[in-house]
Image (tube, coloured by chain):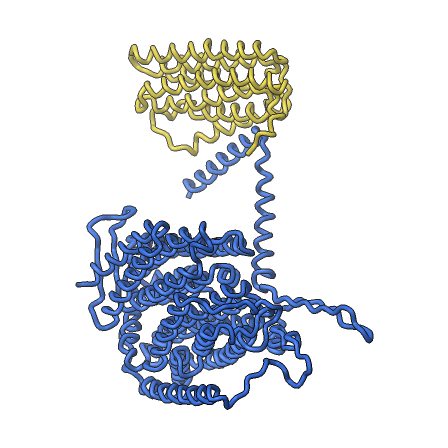
Chain colours: A yellow, B blue
Amino acid sequence: MSSGLNLLIGISMGLNLLALGSSRLPSLIRVAAAQGVVLGLMPLLMEHHFSWLVALTAVTTAVVKGVVIPTLLRHAMRAANIDRDLDPLIGFIPSLLLGAAGTIAAVALVRVVPLLPEHRGLLLVPGSVAAILTGFILLIARSKAISQVCGYLILDNGVYLFGLLLIHAMPLLVEAGILLDLTVAVFVIGIIVDRIQRAFDSLDTRKLTALHE
Amino acid sequence: MTDGPILFVAAAALLLGCLLGPRFPRLWIALTLAGAAAFIAASAHILGGGEPWEWRGGFSVGGEQLHLRLDGLSALFLALLGVVGGAGAVYSRSYWSDAQYPRSAPRGRALWSALVVSMGGVLLASNGLHFLLAWEAFVLAAYFLIILDPDSAGARPAGWLYLAASHAGTLCLFGFFCGIASRTGSWDLGPMRDNAGLAPLFWLGLVGFGLKAGLFPLHVWLPSGHASAPSHVSAILSGVMINMGVYGLVRFTGWLPVPHEAGWVLIFGGAVSALAGMAFAVSQTDLKRLLAYCTVENVGIIGVGLGAALLGSEQGGTSWGGLALAGALLHVWSHGLSKALLFFGAGSVVHATGTRDMSRLGGLWKRMPKTAALFAFGSVAISGLPPLGGFVSEWMIYLGLLGAASSRSPAAWAAIPAAILLGISGALALAAFVKACSAVFLGASRGGTSDHAHESPDLMIGPMAALAALGAVIGLAPAPLWPSIARAAGAWRGPVGPMPWAVLALGLCNLVLAGLALVAAALLGRRVRDGGLKRAPTWSCGYAEPTARMQYTVGSFSGIISGWFSWALRPQGWSQRPRGLFPARAHRFERIPETVLEDAVAPAALGVLQLSTLVRRLQHGRLRFYILYIVAGLAGLGILTAMEARP
């Protein structure tokens, strides 16, 4: 059971690095979506016996993160008609190195964090920290609004992964609520992206500094 | 148990005055006087021997049970608040009339009531939280009163400075009361001198209350605040509000333990404050600024008394310590009364001439004889000359210091220099008030400002006369007042000794002196009326065509004394000397800067401003850097948590 889970987390860590290394917007969206699907399937593996509620959440998460949100993002991308190339502030190789270092640090970190005995053998915490770090690196190092949304999605995946630790304590309703928030947020950002594009002729967030204060 | 209802009536009257004052000026005067009278009545009951009043409300305000207390100490200050609050209300009726200030006068009435009732709240509160609430309320009310006429020159900057200084002080008081609450587990206040852990909080209280009291060098807000406010506001600021700081110091040195150095710091701080305040006062050319600096001096004198009392208490309750404290408390009264009187007098001068610049005044005695007489009376009282109140209270402080000096204890090393410094500052005070009186009221009018001056209406003279009469009572009858003062001082750290015979003797001497002065005045008056003395224009001095410009100027009057203190005052000036046989132009310009404000506080504030401008660069609008800050913050927190968990 735990080996299957660890395998999925390992895949998600690999997807983190893939996200950091991808140089085009569509592939970045695809990676974020794939990670969402992988994480969405996890509750199914964690539960010892099958329950409809858990299955429903897993499927909903996978569908929303894997299909709905990427569709929204692609739609925004097309509507705004933006350049597909990412121009990174921190190059792809340095980003990858940072991400790898972050992942290693996350695995080392797990020794410090006090965990319940049943979570000891799992990679949940390092996987979550690695995803959060990756999200942050994407947010900081990529300048296009949509790529930042992808960073945000990966960051949220990390938070979700951490939340799985509490799957018995946290009502699934809360998970569902977070998912809904996320979807709405992406939806709204999609609209905003369009508006920004029309108003400023660019989606480069570096040029949006005049609005501070 | 009559104090509770009386105080309730006072609060109700004042709050009602706050609400109705803007619309009904006459009703407001009645309500304010009723509130003031109720304050005085309750205090008189306590000071006259009644049991201290304590009351715990059945309900809570701000999550804390209401707890009020009126003992001898707070009653002493509450009665002064009643006297000055009532007198100022009557005075403002003519001074700041609706006809002259249709926009600000109604607002001023409501704020006045708010100020009086919130200061009463400070004096009654026996809970740290409520103390802070009332404190903040009166600080704000006073701010809005200072900028009552925001268009007048200097009012806004003075208000800002006052507000900034007050909030710096309030910040210290927040630390002070939170410290008490966290160490005792309750916001309730009361005697807790056996809890030795509270002693270091004294320093916070000293800064917080010292800023409000205007102890040098924390006085930076005081001169401009007092000078720019309307005069009835200056009177209550100087006569009562700064005494809230004094009250805080006296109250909490009495209730809380203090570090060993506290008495030394207070006695030296007070002496320095007295000397520096008066050195600045002497060289001012603005009448109200002079009075404001004189306030700094008097707070210093009170600080010396309190410091001596602390030293006495350290050595196990000596009689000289009690005497010094009684003198300090009496000085609160004599200073409060005479300073309010002087500010009312200055207000009358401003009302009549439109300026408070002494170098443009002069010769007002002939046009405003009553104001002049009352101002001179106040000057005598505040300079500590017999037979008036200031002399008695300062004499009691001197007696305490002399007692300490002859006690062969370490306290003598503090008392002797303090007594010398007080003596010097007393002499300077005399010089300052001779200068003020002579420049404003004697001589001939400078610059024509006095030509159209008129005597103030009775509503302005009346309150001044009442204050003067009260001040005279303190001077002439200290012995009957002693039991009340002793009761107030007894509420500090336990009973003080019996009345020293010197107080009785002093009262008798003062009576004789006052009698002699009255007889002399009567004889002189008769001679003048009978035509024995010839009236002539002032400053004729044998010149064929005397002019007012031949008089001593205000600056020259104090030039020598200012010269002694030029190392501290740092006077600025430039002059264009007359040249040639027929000099065309000659100029002399002089200015005494606010040394502490301009050379210490302003550069420090500028440094803080530059630092915050640097910090502001962190906010540049680039989103990804903000995210980086978050990552850095999270990482820092993580490292901190890991390090906490490690050992």
Asked whether residue B170 appears in the rendered view, the answer is: no
On screen, residue B551 versus residue A68, left or right, reads right
- Which residue sits furthest front? B531
On screen, residue A68 versus residue B325, left or right, reads right
On screen, residue B153 versus residue B516, left or right, reads right
Q: Residue A154, percent across and down?
A: 49, 20
- Which residue sits furthest left? B1
- Which residue sits furthest right? B580
Q: Residue A165, percent across and down?
A: 36, 24
Tell me which corner region of the image, top left, top right, bottom left or bottom right, holds residue A60.
top left
Depicted B214 relative to depicted B110: above or below = below
On screen, residue B580 versus residue A132, left or right, reads right
Tell me which corner region of the image, top left, top right, bottom left or bottom right, holds residue B95.
bottom left
The residue located at (49%, 63%) in the rendering is: B351
Q: Residue B88, percent across and down?
A: 39, 63
Locate the N terminus of chain A and report the quarter of the image it occupies: top left
Of A179 and B100, which appears nearest the observer?
B100
Locate the C terminus of chain A and report the quarter of the image it occupies: top right
Q: Residue B335, percent across and down?
A: 41, 72
Depicted A184 relative to depicted B104: above or below = above
Query: How many numbered marks, from 0 up?
Result: 0
Of B359 and A57, which appears nearest the observer?
B359
The residue located at (46%, 40%) in the rendering is: B640
Of A112 and B165, which appears nearest the observer?
B165
Asked whether residue B297 appears in the rendered view, the answer is: yes
